[in-house]
Every structure is written in C-alpha cells, then in structure tokens.
Amino acid sequence: MTEDKITGTLVFTVFTAALSSFQFGYDIGVINAPQEIIITHYRHILGVPLDDRKATDNYVINSTEALPTITYPANSIPAGEETMASAGLITMLWSLSVSSFAVGGMIASFFGGWLGDKLGRIKALMVANILSLTGALLMGFSKLGPSHILIIAGRSISGLYCGLISGLVPMYIGEIAPTTLRGALGTFHQLAIVTGILISQIIGLEFILGNHDLWHIMLGLSAVRALLQFLLLFFCPESPRYLYIKLEEEAKAKKSLKRLRGSDDVTKDINEMKKEKEEASSEQKVSVIQLFTNSSYRQPIIVSLMLHVAQQFSGINGIFYYSTSIFQTAGISQPVYATIGVGAINLVFTVLSVLLVEKAGRRSLFLIGMSGMFFCAIFMSVGLVLLGGSVVMWLEHRLGVSSNEVQILALPPGCLCRPGEYLNLSQLRVLIHHFTRDNTPCLAILA
C-alpha cells in the first residue's frame, strides 16, 4: 500500500469543486459595494424623484448619461407622504435584492444531499451550475429591462445554486480526499468562500466595475465562472465513495481511485469504504423527531444548533451585505475601502483559525471569540447612541457594526460554525464526539 499523496488530478478536482465555493462568497459580497448606484438606478427606472442630494451627486459622478428629470403638473407635485412612500418602495426593493439570495439558499439547502445521491456528485454540480448561469445572466442584463425584477429574480436563483453547493462541495471534496489529507483539503471550501467575498469587494471599486456604467457586468460576471466550472467538471472523476457505497460499482470506484491517487494499488481505500458501508448498513436509522425526543441525542443536537444560532446572530451576515452603508452612516468618507478591509480581515483570520483549531481546540476558540464579541457589542451599541443616531437606527445597525469592529475575535467561532460555508461536518462530529458515537450523520440534516 502506498502512502497518501497529493496528485495532479486531486489538486485539479479540488480546485474545480472549490470554484463553487468561490462563487458562494462572490454572491455574498457582490451586492454590497454598488448599493448606492443600484438604488439610484432603481429610482431612475421607477421614476422616483432623485430628491436626495447624496443620491443625485452619486448619479452625476458615476453616470455618463444625463441626470433624469421628472416633470410634474403644477397641481400634482408629490407631497411629503408620497415622497416617503416612494422612498419606502425603494428600500423594500433593495432589501429584497439582498435578502432573496438568502431565501433561495435556505430553500435549496434541503435538496443538496438528495440531488448528489440522485445524480452523482459531478452531475449534481453541473445541474447546479445551470442555476448559477441563469441567475448571472438575469442580473447581467438587468440594466436593459426592469432592473429591480431581474436582480431580485437573479439573486433568488443564485441563492438556490449556493444552497445546493453548500452541501455538495464539502461532501465531494471529503469523499475524494485521502484520509490523512481530508481535513486539510476540506479547508479549501471555506477559504474559497472568503476569497470570493474579498474579490467581489475589490471588483466593486468605482474605477473597476463598481460604477454606473459597469455595475451590471459585475453582477453578471459569475456566468464566466459557471461556464468554466461546467467544462472542467467533465475532466473530474466521480466520487469513489458514491460509486462504491451508493451504486455498488466497485470497478468504477477503483478506476476513479486510481486517477485520484496516482497509483494502481487502491486496496487501502477500498477496504476503508467497505468497512464504512458495513457500518452504515448495520446502523440504526434515526428520524429527525427522534433526535429531539431521545435523550441520547438531545444534548448533541442542542449543542450543534446553538453553534449555528450563535454564528448567525453574531451579525457577520449584516456586515457582508450592508457594510458599505453602515460605514457611510458612521461617517467614513470612503466606505468601500473599509468594506475591503473587512474582507481582508475575514480572509486572514479564516486562514489563522484553520492553523489554530487543532492546537487551541474548537471549544476554546469559540468561547474566546464569543466573549470578546459580547463586550464589543455593548461598546459599539453605546457608541452608536452617543453619535446622536436615533434608537431606530441603533437597533437597525447594532449587530452589524458590533461584529465589524470585533472581527479579530469573532472570526474563529464563525469559521467553525457557519453552516454550509465555514462548517466542516467532520469538525462538528469531533466537537460533539464525547456526547455520542452513534448516528452523528443525522446531525447533517439540521446543520
């Protein structure tokens, strides 16, 4: 038997799969930087007066077109209530443009595993890329039609894609990786995500694509990645575990393993999968309801759920989606550069957390990070109030601003607990291993 090694085929396959994770991160951050430009365009399309001086200045600076003017009859000038209603409509459309991505991801995340088992890992990723391409094209051509409708639809479909790959990519990488390299290669999923976030923020700079003329290209740029990955997947081997355990096709599994391992001797992997298959067949099936009603599973379920709840309520999602407007509210003259700083810190400490997690331990990192966030959240909330903002503004931005200021402390638990993005199921299993040794795969349903 040969020692586990990194082969060219393995590197190529992991890179190809990680392109989906990169797209996940790109879709998270891409909507942030051009917020003011897109909102101004919404006003232009819907005929809402650009009565806000800031929006007007932004339109003039970023546009090569004449400033839109709207003429009202003398007796029908919009009153204050009508202006407020128009502003509310724009706010609602922008909120939908951002949140529709998360809604799509939430829905599709239930079907990632099912699709992978039904079609196979490679074909499932190909089908998912069709969604990514469709969403990118809708957003890329949004400037030519009803922009708000096309962007919301495109973001929703892109969310469906990211929901699918949030389960497919970690599963595929884990199944093709050698046992001794599984943890290291599994980190490429989360690293690709935070890299995608940072790249989207850089591309969102005004002198690159974050301007009035090119913002739609920035939103539709993911179509290039979708086409590239679709073509590269034809050269990637199918998961040997899927072939051996799910389809019971040992010959095809051996062929796939030989390509991935670069050796004709794959006895070690075959014996490992054979043992895994026997354990899976003898394992008692547990329903989702039993996970909560059975005392043997209740404690690990509560632990795993609280990890996810703590991460989601940390406020990091608000930072990724709204950091530009948050920094602008705080009085920063160039908020887009501060947003890039957020992405850079996110990437650096994701790498750092990967290096520390085996030495410091998952529980220790989580407790340190959450303790720091607890105190900094209080400081930032008080700071917002002292800035003279209203209570409503304070409540609206509290979580996001607090998380931004304490990312150094916040990212270690975030990298461990973000479902489908930072969480490796193997890490979760290690964390709760002392609770139970049986049926930990059932936790994937709730993760």
Image: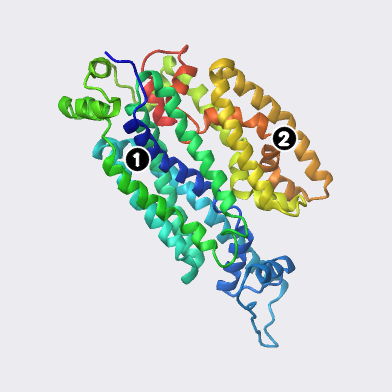
- Distance from label 2 to label 1 (Cα)? 36 Å
Residue at the spot x=33%, y=43% of the render?
Answer: 125
Residue at the spot x=72%, y=72% of the render?
Answer: 80
Residue 133 higher or lower than 428, as above or below: below
Give the percent coordinates (x, y) of residue 220: 46, 58
Q: Which residue is mark 2?
A: 377
Given the image, on which type of amino acid does mark 1 rest?
Answer: Phe
Residue 366 higher or lower than 215, as above or below: above
Is residue 106 in view? yes
Q: Nearer the viewer, residue 219 or 74?
A: 219
Q: Which residue is mark 1?
A: 111
Using residue 304 as the reference point, say whether residue 366 is left or right of it: right
Residue at the spot x=80%, y=41% of the render?
Answer: 383
Give the percent coordinates (x, y) of residue 9: 32, 33
Circle 2 crowding by C-alpha within 10 Å: few under 14, some 14–19, many from 20: many
Give the percent coordinates (x, y) of residue 141: 45, 66
The quadrant of the rendering that contains the C terminus is top left
Q: For numbered disc 2, what is the local secondary structure? A: helix
Given the image, on which type of amino acid does mark 2 rest?
Answer: Ala
Circle 1 crowding by C-alpha within 10 Å: few under 14, some 14–19, many from 20: some
